[in-house]
Image: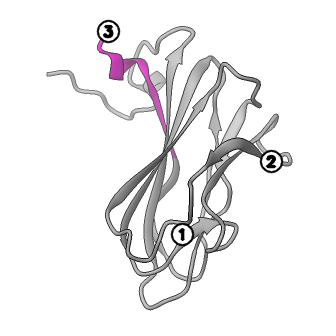
Amino acid sequence: MIEVQNTKSVQLLAPQIKNNGAFANNGYIDTQSFNHLRVLLDVGATDVAIGSGDASTAPLVEECDTTGGSYTAVSGAALSAVIGATDDNKLYAIDIDLTKSHKRYMRVKAPTAGNNVTGANLSILGILSRPDIGPANAAQQGLTEHIKA
């Protein structure tokens, strides 16, 4: 199998623009049966800072034993600073080794945009890899359709 086909992708935050507040529909990822998670923050045009919970706290990943329980920060799983108002069209990644003691469900803590004229364009993707058993089809890879040419 091609290595990228041995992954599962989950859209944690659909592409959207937000000015002054929390982005809508922040999702979680079920990490069961995988040994690595990459959280990829894809920033488009922005004129505001992006953080977690507010626009002055660096984006971070949090975890929980259930989907709707109380999430707590994953140690070491935060960017070094907020995403800045001039950080247009950049990718940011947080990698988490799931072989260490972690809870099953993970998400980015309350992605939040600052306040200015336009706001921030953002999407977040969770990419699971190093599975116990590799995905056998498009759906198990988190895809709607998979073409092999």
* Label 3 residue SS: loop
* Label 1 residue SS: strand
Residue type pointed to by label 1: Ile
Of the 4 image quadrants, the one containing the N terminus is top left
Q: Residue at x 58, y 20 (%)?
A: 34
Viewer-side residue, 146 vs 91: 91
**Residue bearing mark 3:** 1
Give, as a single range, the part of the protein colored magenta: 1-11
Residue type pointed to by label 3: Met
Q: Residues within 10 Å of mark 1 (few under 14, many from 20)?
A: many
Instruction: Say whether residue 138 is magenta.
Output: no
Q: Alpha-carbon distance for marks 3 and 2?
A: 35 Å
Q: Which mark is residue 50?
A: 1
In the rendering, at what x and y percent does residue 134 appear?
Answer: 47, 11
Q: Which mark is residue 71?
A: 2
Q: Alpha-carbon distance for marks 2 and 1?
A: 20 Å
